Amino acid sequence: MSHTEFSPAEQAILQCILMARRDVRGNRFCPDPIAERDVNTILQAAAWAPSVGFSQPWEFVLITDKATRSQVAASFAAENARAQHLFADEKQRHYQQLKLEGILDAPLNIAVFYKPSAQPVLGQTSMVEPGEYSVVCAVQNMWLMARALNIGMGWVSILDPLKVKEILRAPAQLKLVAYLCLGYVNEFLDQPELEILQWEQRKPLETVVHRETFSD
Amino acid sequence: MSHTEFSPAEQAILQCILMARRDVRGNRFCPDPIAERDVNTILQAAAWAPSVGFSQPWEFVLITDKATRSQVAASFAAENARAQHLFADEKQRHYQQLKLEGILDAPLNIAVFYKPSAQPVLGQTSMVEPGEYSVVCAVQNMWLMARALNIGMGWVSILDPLKVKEILRAPAQLKLVAYLCLGYVNEFLDQPELEILQWEQRKPLETVVHRETFSD
C-alpha cells in the first residue's frame, strides 16, 4: 500500500507541465540527437500508462534513419496535398501556410502501434476501443515526460497509416496509433500554435461540462 | 514564448505521479463528495490536453444522482455477466472474484464523450481516430491530476455505450469514450491491482521497443 500524498506544491508542478505541453512543429527542433537516457525516461513514462486489463498493448518503433523518415515524409506530403482541398477559400490559404510536421527536422521519430491480443482482454469485452485508448494514454504520458525534460514532441496524423506500416515492416495485425517527432527545442510557445494563429478558438470549459445528464 | 525549463527535481515529481497513478475500484472509495474546487482542477487539466487541429472535441457529464448511477451500474452488471463466460476455467473463477467498478461506491461519475465536428478538422483528414484520441488524452490528464490531488479514479469500460448514451440523453452524434468513477481514497496500491493479483504480468520494456523498423 502506498500512502504517498502529493502536496499543493507538487500539484502545482503537474499543472505547470500540463499547461506548458505543446505540439511542436518542424521549424522549432534542434537537430542534435536526444540523449539515450532521455529517450529511456520517455519510454518508461509510456510503460506506466494505464491499460485495459493491464494488457499493455503498445509497440514502439524508434526511427532515426533518414531514408526511412523521408519515406514517411513523402506520405505526409501526399496526404497533406489532398487535405488542403477540404478547406475553403481563406481557410485553404491559411492551411497552406501552416507547418504541420517535423518528420525530417526532428532527430527522432517514434511510431506507436496498438497490438490486439489474441486472447479476450478483461475490460475489452463490451467496447473494443479501450485497447487503442490504452496506447493513447501511453502517448500522452510520453508527451508530458518529454515536456518536463524540455524536449519538444509533435504528433503527425496526416499520414496514410497503411503506408507507414509498410515502410516500417509492421506485422499485419498491428494498428498505427501515433507517429511522433521528438527533439530538443530552444523554446516552447505560450499557447497552442493554432490558437495563436487564430485557426481555432479555445472553448470555455462551461460549454463542454454538463450536470447529471445532457439537457433536453 | 516560454522559456520555462523544468528542473530534475520537477521531472522526478512528474515521474512519481505517473508511477503512482492507479485504476481505483469500488471498495476503495470514500463516500464523501469531492470538493467543487478539486473537480474544477481536474476538468481544467482535461482542457489542457492536446487535440487534433485544436478541435477540443470533448464533452463531460458530471453525475452524482444515485438513480442515474444505478442505471449505469445495471448496464455494467449485464455486460459483466456476459463477459465472464469469455474466460475459461481457472481464469473465469478468478474473473468472478474481481471488483471491477465503483459506479455506486464513488461519489462522482464522469462520462466523457467525443463530439465529431461538422466541419473538416485539420489533422483529421487522413485518419479519423485522432478525434477520439484527443478525448483520451484529456482523460489521461484528468487521471494524473486526480492522483496528484490524492483522488482515486477508475475507468469502467464494461458497459453498453449506447445504453449509457440513452441514460444520459446524449445527442445521437456523440460517442462515449470513457466512464470514470472518482472519489477520495485512503491509500493507493503500490502496483496495478491486476499485476498484484497475477491476472497479467508486466511486459519488459525491451520486448515492445524496436529500432528503425520491425525486424523481419
Image (cartoon, coloured by chain):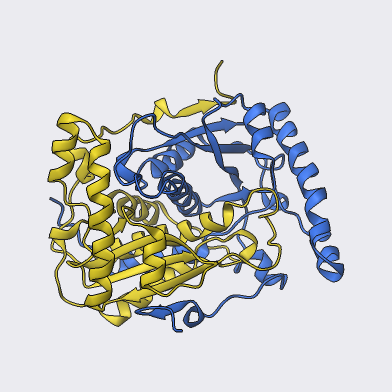
Chain colours: A blue, B yellow
Of residues B116 and A194, the one drawn nearer to the viewer in this rendering: B116
Q: Quick check: A100 left or right of B24?
A: right
In this picture, is B63 found above or below B11? below
Q: Quick check: B63 left or right of A57?
A: left
Q: Please tell me in which quadrant of the rendered image residue A214 appears.
A: bottom left
Residue B102 rendering spot, x and y as whole percentages: 21, 61
In this picture, is A6 found above or below A129? below
Of residues B109 and A186, the one drawn nearer to the viewer in this rendering: B109
Q: Please tell me in which quadrant of the rendered image residue A212 appears.
A: bottom left
Q: Please tell me in which quadrant of the rendered image residue A86 appears.
A: bottom right
Of residues A71 and B92, the one drawn nearer to the viewer in this rendering: B92
Residue B148 rendering spot, x and y as whole percentages: 30, 63
Residue B34 rendering spot, x and y as whole percentages: 24, 76
Q: Do we see residue B202 in this rendering? A: yes
Residue extending furthest toward the top: B216
Which residue sits at x=83%, y=57%? A85
Which residue sits at x=34%, y=44%? A125
